[in-house]
Amino acid sequence: MERAARNIHDPPRRLRGIAKYVALQAAGVAPEDIELVVVRNTDTSENHAVVAVRLDGTWVILDNRRLALVPAREIRHATPLFVIDEQGVRQFMAPTANAQLREGIPALF
């Protein structure tokens, strides 16, 4: 019983990204400014979900494994696999190497 009560207030790690996504929607953040992103952590070889939010025109990442908002362009330990938003689920397609060089986009995110 104590464990069940604790789980209500402390959702399992795998649900925290989804909870953040839903909370941001409920708080009134525009749907086009929120994405749930399934990433492959290149350090641990594990997949997990993070939330991407557009803040003042810049995408930032909310990752329960870090205690800070990190601009998406600075993420180096994760490769995005899928994006989930109000339009549905899409497989992430990285820009070509030429586009990355031309636009200064980091290789991983």
Image: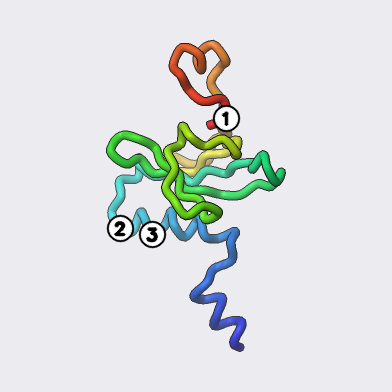
**Labelled pair 2, 1 in contact (Cβ < 8 Å):** no
Q: Amino acid at mark 2?
A: Ala
- How are the colours assigned in the image? rainbow
Q: Nearer the viewer, residue 79 or 90?
A: 79
Of tags 3 and 1, which is closer to the observer? 1
On the image, the x and y values in percent for residue 60 come to: 41, 41
Question: Which label number is shown at residue 108?
Answer: 1
Ranked by sequence position, the earlier of labels 2 and 1 is 2
Q: CA distance from mark 2 to mark 1?
A: 30 Å
The residue that mark 2 highlights is: 27
Q: What's the residue at 55%, 54% (across, down)?
A: 65
Q: Is residue 32 above or below residue 96?
A: below
Query: In the image, 44: left or right of 85?
Result: right
Q: Nearer the viewer, residue 68 or 62?
A: 68
Neighbour class for label 3 at 10 Å: few (<14), some, many (≥20)? few
Q: Amino acid at mark 3?
A: Ala
Q: What's the residue at 46%, 32% (across, down)?
A: 73
On the image, the x and y values in percent for residue 109 come to: 53, 32
Ranked by sequence position, the earlier of labels 3 and 1 is 3
